[in-house]
C-alpha cells in the first residue's frame, strides 16, 4: 500500500492582509507572493521609469540644453556686470584725476595708467571666460549625476521589492519544509521572528 504525503498550507499576512502563501502536496512545495495594489503600482512605475530614462540617460533634450545654456548665460552676464562695476569707477576716477591735474587726457601718465587698467580688465575677462566654461561643465556633470542617481534609486527600489518578496517566499517555503519534516514549533517561531524583522508585525 502506497504512502500518501500529507498536504500543508501556510500564509504570511501583514496588517491582516496575506502577502505570501506556501503549500505542500505530494512532496512538492509551492510559494506565492502577493503585492498590494500600491506596491504593484510603485513597482511597475519604477520599472517603466528605469527603462524610459536608461535609453536617453546621456542625451539632452532641447529643453534641457536651453535650461543649461540659460544658466551659463546668466552666470556670464553676472560676471560681466561685476567687471564693469569694478573697472568703470576706476577709469572714471583716473580720467577725473588726470584732467584736474593736467587739463586734458592727452598725456603719457594717463595713457600708462589706462594701459595698466585695461590689462587688468583683460585678465579679468579671460578669467571669466574660463569660469564660464567651468560652469558649463559643472552644470552638465550635475545633470548627468542627477540622472544616474535617479536610475540608481529606481533600480534599488525594484531590487528591494524583489528581495523582500524572495525573502518572504524563502522563509515561508522553509517553514513549510520544516513543518513537513518535523512539525517543529521552535522552527516555526524562528521563521516568524525572521519575517517580523523584515516587515514589522507580520503574522503567520
Image (cartoon, grey):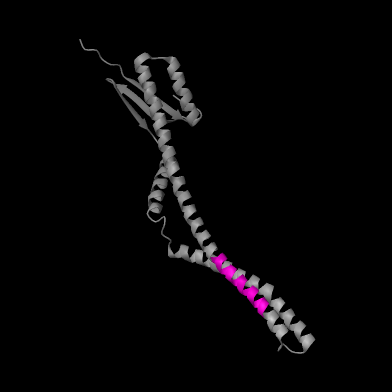
Near-viewer residue (161 or 105): 105
- Position of residue 170 measured from the top left corner of the image (x, y, whole percent): 38, 28
- Position of residue 134 measured from the top left corner of the image (x, y, whole percent): 54, 62
As drawn, 103 above or below 87: below
State which quarter of the image contains the C terminus.
Answer: top left
Q: Is residue 36 visible?
A: no
- Position of residue 121 measured from the top left corner of the image (x, y, whole percent): 64, 74
User: Residue shown at 71%/85% (left/top)?
Assistant: 108
Query: In the drawing, does residue 83 fall left or right of residue 199?
Result: right
* In the image, residue 57 lies in the stretch drawn in magenta: no
* In the image, residue 118 lies in the stretch drawn in magenta: yes
Near-viewer residue (79 or 16): 79
User: Residue shown at 59%/68% (left/top)?
Assistant: 127
As drawn, 1 above or below 171: above
User: Residue shown at 70%/79% (left/top)?
Assistant: 113
**Magenta span of residues:** 115-132
State which quarter of the image contains the N terminus.
Answer: top left
As drawn, 138 above or below 167: below
Q: Is residue 129 visible?
A: yes
Amino acid at each position: 500500500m502506497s504512502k500518501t504525503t500529507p498536504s500543508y498550507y501556510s500564509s504570511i499576512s501583514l496588517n491582516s492582509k496575506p502577502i505570501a502563501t506556501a503549500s505542500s502536496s505530494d512532496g512538492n512545495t509551492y510559494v506565492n507572493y502577493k503585492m498590494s495594489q500600491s506596491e504593484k503600482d510603485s513597482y511597475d512605475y519604477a520599472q517603466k521609469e528605469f527603462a524610459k530614462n536608461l535609453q536617453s540617460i546621456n542625451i539632452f533634450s532641447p529643453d534641457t540644453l536651453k535650461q543649461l545654456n540659460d544658466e551659463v548665460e546668466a552666470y556670464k552676464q553676472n560676471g560681466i556686470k561685476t567687471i564693469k562695476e569694478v573697472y568703470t569707477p576706476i577709469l572714471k576716477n583716473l580720467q577725473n584725476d588726470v584732467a584736474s591735474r593736467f587739463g586734458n587726457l592727452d598725456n603719457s601718465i594717463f595713457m600708462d595708467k589706462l594701459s595698466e587698467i585695461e590689462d587688468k580688465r583683460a585678465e579679468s575677462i579671460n578669467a571669466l571666460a574660463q569660469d564660464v566654461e567651468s560652469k558649463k561643465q559643472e552644470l552638465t556633470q550635475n545633470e548627468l549625476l542627477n540622472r544616474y542617481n535617479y536610475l540608481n534609486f529606481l533600480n534599488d527600489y525594484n531590487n528591494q521589492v524583489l528581495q523582500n518578496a524572495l525573502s518572504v517566499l524563502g522563509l515561508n517555503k522553509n517553514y513549510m519544509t520544516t513543518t513537513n519534516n518535523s512539525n517543529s514549533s521552535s522552527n516555526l517561531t524562528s521563521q516568524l521572528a525572521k519575517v517580523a524583522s523584515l516587515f514589522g508585525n507580520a503574522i503567520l
